[in-house]
Image (tube, rainbow, N blue to C red):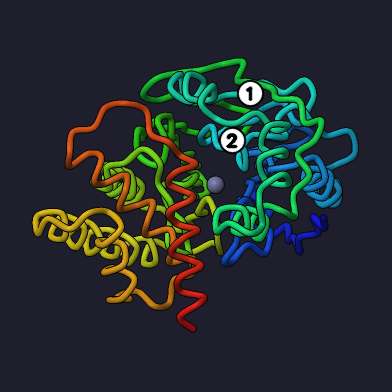
Amino acid sequence: MTEHATTHLTRIADGVHVWAPDGAGTWGLANCVLVSSGTRAALVDTPYTTALAEQLLTAARRVLPTGATFDTVINTHANGDHCYSNAFFTGAEIIATESCREHACFEPAPDLLHQLVHGSDPGQPLGRYLRRHFGRYDYRGIQLAPPTRTFTAELTVHPGDEDELHLIEVGPAHTAGDLIVHLPRQRVVCTGDVFFAGDHPVHWAGPLERVMDACRRILDLRPQTVVPGHGPVVGPAALREHLDYLADLRGRIHTLHARGLDERKATSELLRENRHPHLGLPERLAILTAVEYRHLGGVTEPPDLLAFMAEAARHAQEAEQAR
Ligand SMILES: [Zn+2]
């Protein structure tokens, strides 16, 4: 198990740094944003594991003044790669949407996830996929720290004297409880996972129209800098391009659904068409299709996320064998 990730802490605006692991084509390596003012610091999202949180803290110490403390942690949503190391930032107020707090109980506990990944059968597509993409992480002993402050709709916080962080609820979209963070003075928006740069996204809640609404909401804020949940920091043009991609994908999925193709066949068709070859992790189209089909079919019972992953793994293996 090697958890090593190449990480960078990059200044993107006044008092704003992005901790960005090299995460192209991977699961779990999310961006975190450090907002500092004097000795007070806020963090948007916390890394997946304690080892990664230690890397972040070491990097943060180099840019923060001596004695600086993390007073505020914001979780953009409840997926573990954005909140598993909350407890590492002792004493911080942890802010999320009310729906995020409610959704957290559907996420696997770290120890259970560890067992699931490292105890999986490598002879099966799912086991092979989980080991390949999550086998690098050690989740043992991670203590969860749930939000200590929640809100609905909007909330403005002032972690430092000058800074204003405007939190806007945009879920359900990627998950049930997504939020974005707008820094009006610096013209930065942290999008959480309603926007992935560089790879096909994965969205668990949907429908895609809600994700598109969230992206439009971000563009309406007229940001100069957009920090995606995963992938490189970009400008608004890349988000506009992503919105076109989502519209195209949504259109294709709806067409295939109307033609009567089941989810598996529809995914195979999308993979065969390969309309967006520059994006990584195309097997995620299986999950995007399954979630969109649920909405199209009016399915209301809770989704089986592991079954979604198994389908993605099956398609990944098929593609590998075809090469
Ligand atoms: Zn994520």
Local packing at callout 2 (Cα closer than 10 Å; few below 14, some 14-19, many 20+) is some
- Closer to the camera, 157 or 256? 256
Decide if residue 212 is on the left or right side of residue 152: left
Decide if residue 295 is on the left or right side of residue 14: left
Local packing at callout 1 (Cα closer than 10 Å; few below 14, some 14-19, many 20+) is many
Quadrant in the picture for residue 93: top right
> Can you see residue 91?
yes
Residue, far bottom: 323
Q: Which mark is residue 163?
A: 2
Residue, far front: 123
246 vs 107: above or below: below
> Can you see residue 18?
no
131 vs 156: above or below: below
Residue type at mark 2? Answer: Asp
Disc 1 secondary structure class: strand
Residue at point 22% right, 54% down?
262
- Closer to the camera, 294 or 47? 294
User: Is disc 2 in contact with disc 1, using a CB cutoff of under 8 Å?
Assistant: no
Quadrant in the picture for residue 13: bottom right
Q: Within 8 Å: ligand 1 and the Cβ of disc 1?
A: no
Of the image marks 2 and 1, the number of the one nearer the N terminus? 1
Residue at point 9% right, 59% down?
259
- Closer to the camera, 34 or 230? 230
Residue identifier under label 1: 94
Residue type at mark 1? Answer: Ile
Q: In this figure, what is the number of numbered marks?
A: 2
Quadrant holding the N terminus: bottom right
Q: Position of residue 162 (x, y in %)?
A: 61, 34
Residue at point 53% right, 50% down?
229
